[in-house]
Amino acid sequence: MSNTSKILLGFIAGAAIGGALGILLAPDKGSETRRKIVEKGSDLGDSITDFGETVKEKFNDVVENVKGSFNKTKNSMS
């Protein structure tokens, strides 16, 4: 996992923890707190999906670079 991915994952985790603590410690009614938790859970799910797509794109870029390097080496040996 690259440093950028680790930083992004740390940021997402920190935001999720901070948001959850903020909601749980807020002086709201129970129904309002539950609604906020559902909204934050949905936001977290979206963030995780975006992170997964970013990782997938970076992985595909690495695979393409390796394939290109392999083909260059293969052609230079022929």
Image (spheres, rainbow, N blue to C red):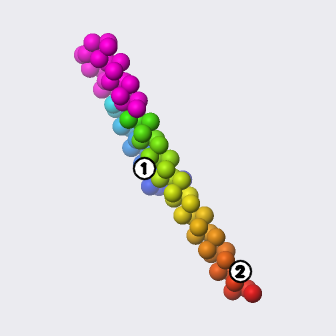
Main secondary structure type of the part rendered in magenta: helix
Quarter holding residue 36: top left
Residue 62, given in percent of the width and then of the height, sits at 57, 64
* Residue 17 visible in the snapshot: no
Q: Residues within 10 Å of mark 2 (few under 14, many from 20)?
A: few
Residue sitting at 38 percent across and 35 percent down? Answer: 43
* Left or right: 63 as drawn, with respect to 52: right
* Whether residue 45 can be seen here: yes
On the image, numbered disc 2 is attached to which residue?
74
Which residue is nearer to you in this view: 35 or 62?
A: 35
Image spot of residue 7 (x, y percent): 42, 49
The residue to which callout 1 is attached is 7
Give the position of the C terminus as an image quadrant: bottom right
Image position, residue 61 (x, y; %):
54, 64
Total numbered circles:
2
Which one is in front, 15 or 57? 57
Report which quarter residue 74 is drawn in.
Answer: bottom right
Which amino acid type is marked by label 1? Ile
The residue positioned 41% from the left and 35% from the top of the image is 44
